[in-house]
Amino acid sequence: MYQTLYRKYRPTCFDEVVGQKIIVRTLKNTIENHTLSHAYLFTGPRGTGKTSVAKILAKTVNCENLNDCKPCNKCVSCTQINNKQSIDIIEIDAASNNGVDEIRELKSKVSLVPSVGKYKVYIIDEVHMLTTGAFNALLKTLEEPPEHIIFILATTEPHKIPATILSRCQRFDFKRIPEEEIYQRLKYVSEIEKIEIEDNSLMEIARLADGGLRDALSLLDQVIAYSKDKVTLEDVHEINGTLTPLQLKNFIEYLINHDIENLFRLLDQYDQNGKNFVKLSEELILFLRNCLLAYTVPTYLQEKESNIKFYQIQNLNKDDILKWIQVLNQTIYNMKISSHPKILLEVALIDLMNLEKIELKNELKKEVKVEKEFKEPTEEVKKSKELEEKIEKSMEKVEDRQNENKSQIDEIIAKVKHIRINNTLCNFNKKSLLDWKSKLNQIENELTNPENGQIASLILDGELKAVGNQYFIFVYENSRLSNLFNEQLLLVDSFLNSIYHNPIHAIATNTDDWNRIKKEFNSKTKTYQLEEEPIDLLKILKTKANKSEIENMFENIIQYEN
């Protein structure tokens, strides 16, 4: 049976680990100096070697004939580990074994001594997925384990791990692997596997992997399966759903030349081919960044890119590049929370080309030309002036309406927030809070649901801080996320009601405001529950939220054409 490259070339000793020199050196010194800790926490992005290093550490500390921190691969312990038969190395996937019962079962077996090796090593992957109860069950064992036990916790989201667990572990932060080191590893694998692949294709795979060697090897596996003979750069982009530098250059040139027709045809083509428009926008930003470097520091870009001619585009100035990057960056954020990313990208591109100003400028040029040829203005000039006035009035109305809607929506959210925070704190119940914290794990099942995934992710990014009589307060580290939560309050309430079949009234705030709110509330002598009035206000909010800026803009255009 074929074995995938990332499994086949997984490192088996510390010397084979790529891109984590500091962590490898620290662990080797720890083993040589016999100063092993009882608990380690490996954090970092996916595919950077956390689980691999955990397995290497477990194998190394149990080897009977260790030579310069290299396992001998001949002793009983090494042989059992290599054949996946060792009962001293216990791997636990916290994503599927995240309850209290599983951790209690683990605790009951901790006291058992190793069968062959010196240590029993528990590797708990995705440890942030454990429930609050499971963390509490693990806490005492983690603090005072037997001498023959080593815990290695691995996670991509350390901020979700309780501080009491963090303080009991020796933490190692795995960094994204540099592109050059990924490239060298891919080249080594290609030579061993006798794969015909161009160097620029390997460099592109290394770039697209975004610091994850596992992702790079998986992508290499895909392009090998896709290509018949030699793997080319076009094959890499076709498999990954991205565009080649030449395609990106053509795309930017359409923008510069205001060729909206060909640009939209390209987008239709990408849509039919299943391209991801968020990824496409990110590629455009990276391409524009390289264009900016080509203007400002070409020698630096030359070191990073083998062919900088793609980024030297005529009629593209620095101000345009900066503006385009800013617009595209905001569009990416909007597309991630929208069910119509293509429409948002199309509107953003129209904004980038600034077609309204171009048309107005052309009409004004015609007017000047006509007035030069004729002393009195003609019918064409009069129509041009009327068109100019209509455009200006239209843009003013749209802007006024947007400002008015935003201020009304902000006012509604502020009223809802005041009432719900007050009612939550008036009826605060610590037992209900603990119960609901454990119930929130049900939301994780909705993360893969296309309809509810974004709302579920948004809720789980916050921390439930207070519960009282069906009122919930979620606290976020920054105001951007809490504002986004409150702007989608109707969807949040509807989602929570559908999951728990209870009329839940949620609200969000940020950490700084939460500390102030608690202080002010505790200083009050009397507190009263406020009437939940904002049902009508929320309906207004829904009406205004559904009528987006895009609809307002097109509504005005339709009115003028009629």
Image (tube, helix red, strand yellow):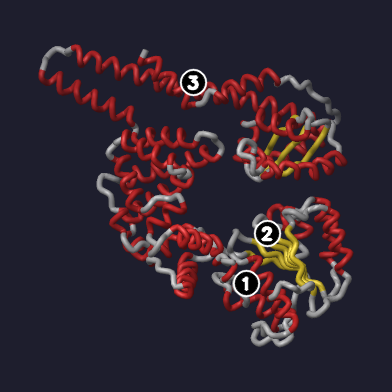
* Name of the residue lying farthest toward the front: 1
Three-letter amino acid code at disc 2?
A: Thr
- Mark 1–mark 2 Cα distance, whole angstroms, equals 16 Å
The front one of 373 and 447 is 447
The circle drawn on residue 264 is: none
Residue at screen point 77% across, 28% down: 503
The front one of 371 and 203 is 203
Identify the residue position indicated by label 3 in the image.
401
Q: Earlier in the sequence, mark 1 or mark 2?
A: 1
Label 1 residue SS: helix
Label 3 residue SS: helix
Residue at screen point 61% across, 23% down: 542
> Quadrant of residue 205 in the image?
bottom left
Residue at screen point 51% across, 58% down: 210
The circle drawn on residue 23 is: 1
Residue at screen point 84% across, 55% down: 136
In this view, the mark in front (3 or 2): 2
Three-letter amino acid code at disc 3?
A: Arg
> Quadrant of residue 468 in the image?
top right
Q: Is residue 147 above or below residue 285?
A: below
Three-letter amino acid code at disc 1?
A: Ile
Q: Is residue 4 left or right of residue 279?
A: right
Query: Which x, y percent locates residue 559?
Result: 40, 15
Quadrant where the C terminus is found in the figure: top left
Q: Earlier in the sequence, mark 3 or mark 2?
A: 2
Identify the residue position indicated by label 2 in the image.
155
Label 2 residue SS: strand
> Quadrant of residue 307 in the image?
bottom left
Q: Earlier in the sequence, mark 1 or mark 3?
A: 1
